[in-house]
Image (cartoon, coloured by chain):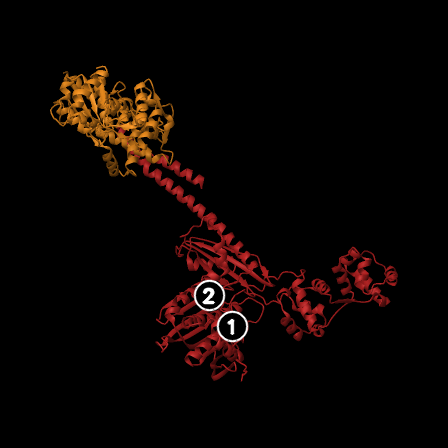
Chain colours: A red, B orange
Amino acid sequence: MVTFQEISPADFFYRNRDIAGFTNPSRAIFASIRELVENSLDSADQMNIPPEVYVRLSQENSATESGNGVYRLKIMDNGSGISARHIPSAFGQVLFGSKYTLKQARGTFGLGGTMAILYGQITTHKPVLIKSSTGTSKIYEYKLMIDIQRNRPLILDRKTRRNKEQWRGTIVEFSLEGDYLRAMSKILEYLKQTALVTPYADIRFVDPKGRLYLFSRATKNMPPPPTETLAHPYGVDVETIQRLIRVTDCRNLLDFMRKHFHRVGQGISLSFLDFVGFIKTANPQRLKPEDVTRLVETIKKFKKFKKLFGKVSEENLKASLEKTKSQNMLDFMKSNFPNVDRTIILRLLSSAGFVRTKNPKKLRPDEIVRLVRMMKRFDGFLPPDASCLSPLGEELLRTGILKELKPEFIAVCQRKPSTYAGHPFIVETAIAYGGDIPKKDDFVVYRFANRIPLLYDEASDISVKVIRSINWRRYKVISGMPVAILVHVCSTKVPYKTVGKEFIADRPEVKSEILNGIREVARRLQTFLAKREHVAKERRRLSVFSKYLPKIARFSTELAGKEEEPDIELLLRSVRKFEEKGD
Amino acid sequence: MKRKEIESSAKEKKKEILKDLKGFGRKLYCQMELGKFPWVEMPSRSTENIFYSPELRQYILGEKSVKRSARNIRHIRPFTQMVWAGFFASELVKNRKTSTLRDVYYSAQAYEMSFKDQPESNNIITDLETATGFAREDFNVFPEERSAIFGDLTIEYTVPGYEGKQLNLTSHPDGVMIGPSLVSSEFVKTGADKVIAIEKGGLFTRFVEERVHERFNALLVLTAGQAPRATRHFIHRLNKELDLPVFIFTDGDPWGMHIAMVIISGSANAAHLRGLTTPDAKWSGVYATDIVDYKLPSDPLTAVDVKRLHELEKDPRYEGDLWKREIKTFLKIKKKAEQEAFSRYGLTYIVDEYLPAKLEAMGD
């Protein structure tokens, strides 16, 4: 007999932890640190204060039967803190989070932090310790475990302390099984790259051997915080619309579109609903005299209408209305004012109160599907704006790279906002040369998405594909040069290919922005390299002259039987002068 | 003979060379003092500037000249090397020391003037020859290859430690090496009335054994293959200073022919120099026609030999009837013979029969 059973989200991720990046003990320890560090950075960003994150990993006992150690991980931040009533759910319930909004943040699912704790629990069966304060007079301490089958926190203990020093932030501490030695290089690389892309953060890491890795902030300037945004019509599906219908208080589709969608105003809303065929206008046959007066008044009231419709008298209009066979005002106006744009007529009719649209709550399922389908087809929507995004900005990007790589040359570029499938995104690129960058056959590529370093699956990533497709010789870049390329993609929805946030998929819009961004910085690198080459060539030239001229002077003096050598300073100077001119 | 004159002529030459080198240095020195990049102008040695002069019966350089300037980044290194070579040559001449091309290559390293390789160093010496008009032997730079002379000629040395000492060149049966001291010596007297140059050592020894120098009253010169420049110069002197006719015996093949030709008309490589040719010298065999007339044992011509013959056909130095006839005969009979081929008629046949016949035919 087949048995059916429902499982909770926590249970689901317990059974499928691979998809969240907890594949093996070394990945698990890396993913745990990463998820919690990202939560900490996000919570400080939210408060617009420069983050301070302290991470300590210590060994509890060595080598379990599986060969891995048990570690205790402690992460402390100065972020927003979590209010007392949300603490248990935030850490003891999978998919409970503050990030289900349309603005850029590192995390998106409310999954990572809890997954780390869940992983700790299933490998060590120990509770997690949370301390948090939002800066009020109290600090709350919880000892929690997760009821995996029911996806509910189990509170083992809770304490309240007085917060004398007005501390604000969160401390998470728990045990987990892992393999630090194998994860070490990735963890350090992750922290280094995080420091690079978050130059305003102080990150400290103490590893199990007691070594302190310090990534000090280089600036206190933070990028402007993103604002929450509405969904763009291009990016929604039937489910989203149905949820919106459930909660909306709008009584008609015109208001519904304006209120719940990104960059949709009265005009666009009208045109779109007209495009879908969801607009009804009054029947001219049944107009009352006051309706006609209202229409004429509306035309008179707005300059724009007056200019386009000209002088319209009630008498004339009434006469036309009597003659017409049109069944709706839109057709009537259209035939009477053939030169006026349809949208303007719609606007006029709407202003004068002749337009009716359906109550969204009364839409039939097939109408909802039609609405969504038409949203994708309508070309009158404005592209999303980027206020919901928080790119790092050229200045901070430069600061971060200088801090971590100390290059000889650096070029950064922030592209203009663009969109794919209704999601706004911004690409930032940088190229750095020399300094701490190793000389390798291949470039060092730093990939970031919403300020998260992407460390795995480099070969599958779009940026790497773009970099490979470029003919670098054109930019005077040859193999073996110390070159690092950085690509940062910010979006309300980064096109990841997997849940593990490891690489970005091939989206043509994103690809072309990345390509243009890299070309831009590569051109500047080319200028730098060309100049350097020129200087080196001139230096070589000068060294040839200063090597041989004195010898010519010496030997010809001997040959001529003279005592004193001729002064060749003048000649050498003339060569140098030439060099400056040529520069 | 007149010792004073001998001494003075050697000193004269030395003075002239030193004066010339000093002038070279002074010119560069003045250019630099005037705040100019030093430069020199000299005849171009590129192939399009090498011409055959029927009057001089040798290759000469044409009108084209090249300017070497220290201002030019590509010139400054060879320019400096040339100035150094001039300095080095003047030191050699002043101190009466001799040197070789290999020596020059190594000596440069002591002045931090390292040459890339031997050809680069050789080329710089040729530059100096071109710029000054003197042969490197005049600067006491001698090649490694050595050839020899035997016969009744008394010379007087001018080299340090041997000044005034005289030597008769019959004093050693292996012949006397034509080295720096012999080349720089003065001729005192000779009983010979001709010079016979021989390509190969074996035949040279045979000639000495058979007393050819006495029987034919000749000075015997061993060229040891292609005659070195010092030897060519020496033959030139024997011809010019002592008025001795020169006969050249080589193998009967295109290569032997050319050994004779270089002694007579010089080479394109030495187009910038005079005094290395002996236009009146005669090639006296082995001819292609000798192979037929004397029924000499022979080898077939190889493809390379044939190719060389076709090259020689177009060479302006091979204008004369004798040359044309022999090239044609070689190509016709497709055979070649070495000098030793005469041994089939007995070891002394070449001296007893062939040589007298040849010399008579050559109008001696």
Circle number at residue A80: 1
Residue B326 position in % (x across, y down): 30, 22
Residue projecting furthest to the front: B295
In the rendered view, would you say B129 is above or below A354? above
In the rendered view, would you say B75 is above or below A203? above
For residue B138, what is the image quadrant?
top left
In the rendered view, would you say B157 is above or below A202? above
The chain under label 2 reads A
Residue projecting furthest to the top: B363
Residue position marked by numbered label 2 in the rendering: A201
Circle number at residue A283: none
Q: Amino acid at mark 1?
A: Ser
Residues flagged by tags 2 and 1 on a common chain: yes
Label 2: state its secondary structure.
loop
Label 1: state its secondary structure.
loop
Q: Amino acid at mark 2?
A: Ala
